[in-house]
Amino acid sequence: MATVLKIQGGFPLNGTIQISGAKNSALPLMVACLLTDQPLTLTNVPNLADIRTTTQLLEILGVVATQGEDTRTLCASHITSTTAPYDLVKTMRASVLVLGPLVARYGIARVSLPGGCALGARAVDVHLEGLRAMGATCDLDEGYIIAKAPNGLHGANFTMRVVSVGATENLMLAASIAKGQTILRNVAREPEIVDLANCLNAMGAKVEGAGTDTITIEGVSALHGATYKVMPDRLETGSYAIAALITGGDVVLKNTSLDYLPMVRETLEKAGAVFEEEVDGFRIYQNGPIQGVDVMTEPYPGFATDLQAPMMALMGICEGASMITETIFENRFMHVPELVRMGANIQVHGASAMVRGVKKLSGAPVMATDIRASIGLVAAGLAAKGDTTISRLYHLDRGYDSLETKLQGCGAIVERIKVDAS
Ligand code: EPZ
């Protein structure tokens, strides 16, 4: 038997959704515990498979983890291993974030090379180039990156070849306890980078410039413990905003902010969305039929690649047409054939997809291929006529805390059911 998500589509979402803490912020924040022998307590931690995987990885390294409903306390006072094994890294590429902190604090790290994933090759060369600039040697042995810096890391002037969220985080973590000053240029400007800088500073680090393209870090000899609240999940926020629109609904999103979604807001407004700011969140509904708008994914503050799939589902029912161009990942259109199974009219030409709006999508059995493809299919299923069943739910569970409960609270008819796997 396999578990699938069954959605009876065609009902507008109406109600309030509480947004959880950000997965993509919580993961590097958890890893920051490796930089101190004192406890780091994080609050507003989402209940997700990737958080459990990161906890497991940290425990393998010797971190003592305790958890409350949405809190995690992580204490790295007795690290017993500096190896991140393949079995975990292959399920979650963000595991590579332990590389910088481990080599900075212990002088050695052995982290499985992640390999390709559903989104494409996804190299980690920029992570390694940055660590080399800080004095580490990085070699490959039997599928593992072996990073060594027996005398510790030193500060460096480093310009990233490509803007990478993960490399920015890895190098910020490492530089916070390296000797001297590090200047990182052409870095990612995502709000999660700012959240990491704020948490590191709460732990005694000296990080400046996060949120701009240059970050300066004065290394300190040791960090201390802290209690820090994870920022709201802007990708969950954007996903539910799009789900509200695709169903013709009217939804209030709480515990979040429009400030994290500048380009998404601008794009959705062009498509006919109305946003009303509220205390601790905002309301979203539509002002007439959804219009086709062109979208190009870009590093923040551009349109997030992680919202490209739900945006494509929305454009599937627009008036007119939309050209959606993916510039971050080489293989992030795996949801297209699934949306086409639901009646969408989409043609892919290289990195662009031409979406011609249809009047109605129709429910179908579909398969999720990554976290965000999953939510694109959920959005399509909520709008479609008839039943949609989505398989491979483990992708969804990596990124969306309490999805069914949140959607049911807005009137959606959605449930997990067991089906014959054959
Ligand atoms: C982060 O992945 C996010 N993950 C991803 O979210 C997100 O899609 C991505 O940033 C882009 O916004 C987390 O924060 C845990 P990158 P990351 O390094 O850090 C190339 C989700 O659904 N590159 O910014 O792995 C790379 O191949 C996930 O929540 C190199 O060439 O992404 C890609 O084309 C999926 N060399 C581009 O840069 C490197 O050393 C951006 O990747 C590193 C990256």
Image (cartoon, rainbow, N blue to C red):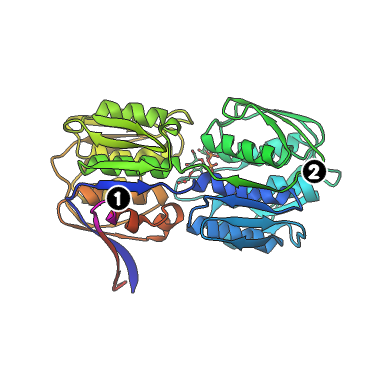
Of the numbered discs in the image, which one, if any, rests on residue 184?
A: none
Lower position in the chain sequence, tag 1 or tag 2? 2
- Secondary element at tag 1: helix
Answer with the quarter of the image where residue 331 lies: top left
* Residue on which disc 2 sits: 222
Residue 420 shows up from this direction = yes
At label 1, counting other C-alpha atoms closer than 10 Å, the crowd grade (few under 14, some 14-19, many 20 or more) is many
Q: Quadrant of residue 215?
A: top right
In percent of the image, x 76 and y 59: which residue is there? 79
Q: Which mark is residue 377?
A: 1
Quarter of the image with the C terminus is bottom left
Query: Residue 196, how many percent across, how many down?
Result: 61, 39
Label 2 residue SS:
loop
Relative to residue 342, is residue 49 drawn left or right?
A: right
Find residue 187 and report its horizontal and vertical position in percent. 60, 30
Amino acid carrying mark 2 in the image: Ala
